[in-house]
Image (cartoon, rainbow, N blue to C red):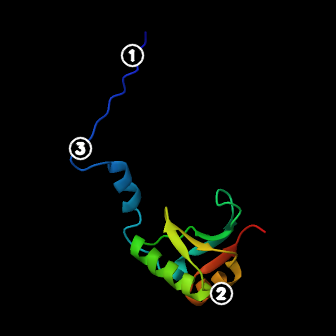
Amino acid sequence: MPNNNKTVWSSSDGDLRKKEQTASHARSLPPQQQTAYLHRESGGRGGKVVSVVKNLILTEDDLKVLAKKLKQECGTGGTVKDGLIEIQGEHRQRMAEVLTRLGYKVKIAGG
């Protein structure tokens, strides 16, 4: 019978892999140096559509501030999840206008 025991190791610092991932976003890049990609997704949401902002290098706080601004401009709800901003509904065009006004380059992906 093969030995199926897996070694589990932890340190007092917790999972260092997660800290490495967030450490890369310790500082936000200025909007002029970034391109925001706007996607439309509906998978896993019961057929409901969300507009997603991807590829921004921002701190968690800056992402939340930007998400709040987009939610206010679109008049809808949304969230920040895994470094992405999700806005409820199909609002890519409006979001593109807001992001462009803030200085981001914008690419609208998908149909």
- On the image, the x and y values in percent for residue 25 come to 41, 66
Evaluate if marks 1 and 3 touch, with contact meaning CB atoms under 8 Å apart. Answer: no
Q: Is residue 22 left or right of residue 69?
A: left
* Cα gap from disc 3 to disc 2, whole angstroms: 46 Å
- On the image, the x and y values in percent for residue 7 come to 33, 29
* Cα gap from disc 1 to disc 2, whole angstroms: 58 Å
Q: Who comes first in sequence, dot 1 or dot 3?
A: 1
Which residue is nearer to you in this view: 103 or 80? 80
Q: What residue did someone put label 2 on?
A: 97
- Quadrant into which the N terminus falls: top left
Q: What residue did someone put label 3 on?
A: 11
> Badge 3: how crowded within 10 Å, few (<14), some, or many (20+)?
few
Q: What residue did someone put label 1 on?
A: 3
What amino acid type is highlighted by mark number 2?
A: Glu
Which residue is nearer to you in this view: 110 or 36? 110
- Quadrant into which the C terminus falls: bottom right
What amino acid type is highlighted by mark number 3?
A: Ser
Residue extending furthest right?
111
Q: Who comes first in sequence, dot 3 or dot 2?
A: 3
Evaluate if marks 3 and 2 touch, with contact meaning CB atoms under 8 Å apart. Answer: no
- On the image, the x and y values in percent for residue 13 come to 24, 50
> Badge 2: how crowded within 10 Å, few (<14), some, or many (20+)?
few
Q: Who comes first in sequence, dot 1 or dot 2?
A: 1
Position above or below: 77 against 15? below
What's the residue at 75%, 67% (across, down)?
A: 110
Residue 62 image-quadrant placement: bottom left
Which residue is nearer to you in this view: 109 or 30? 109
What amino acid type is highlighted by mark number 1?
A: Asn
What's the residue at 58%, 81% (across, down)?
A: 104
Residue extending furthest bottom?
101
